[in-house]
Amino acid sequence: MPEEIINIEKIMEIIPHRYPLLLVDRIIEYKKGESIVGIKNVTINEHFFQGHFPGKPVMPGVLVIEAMAQLGGVLAAREVGGIEDGVIFFMSIEKAKFRKPVVPGDQLRLVAELLYLRRNVCKLKTKAYVDDQVVCEAILCSMLVNNKESK
């Protein structure tokens, strides 16, 4: 059964990202050991629309991937009981595909399915949707690192 909705304040307690690079607004579903679903509301006020592209604003694809990675970070942190003394680093992005541009006014529904979490390595199958259309998908791998070990 899905757990409670996680609001932005709680997300900020779970992952270290902050404006302008906090790209998950809310978690709407979390199934322990399985998956997580989050929302990113994309507005014309996003900083990246100033230059990408003037007159035809499009959310950079790498930021859609970053949003999926942040969602995966929330999932990984919940699975291991928190990462207060650590951080999650990208290890790889595989099979990334961009299907459709994301524009102001879109609501991204981000989905991450846990493929495995072994020791401190997490692998996820991720997708981003606008309405019911897949706009981006990728396999993401990350590592949870204790801050003392990352120096």
Image: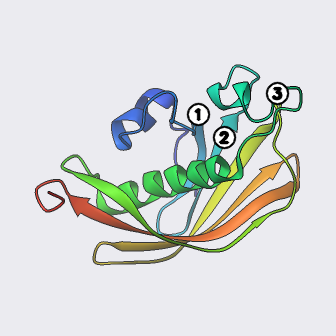
Q: In this rendering, would 134 be left or right of 123?
A: right
Q: Which residue appears at 18% of the width and 59% of the height?
A: 150
Labelled disc at residue 54: 3
Q: Secondary structure at mark 3?
A: loop
Decide: few, some or many residues near mark 1? Use Cα within 10 Å; few <14, some 14-19, many ≥20. Answer: many
Which quadrant holds the C terminus? bottom left
Amino acid bearing label 3: Pro
Q: Secondary structure at mark 1?
A: loop
Residue under label 1: 25
| Amino acid marked by disc 1 | Asp
Could you say where residue 134 lies in the image, as x and y percent from the top left?
Answer: 83, 59
- Which quadrant of the structure image shows residue 60? top right
Quadrant into which the N terminus falls? bottom right
Is the C-beta separation of discs 2 and 1 under 8 Å? yes
What residue is rendered at 83% in x and 36% in y?
A: 103
Q: Secondary structure at mark 2?
A: strand
Residue beneath disc 2: 39
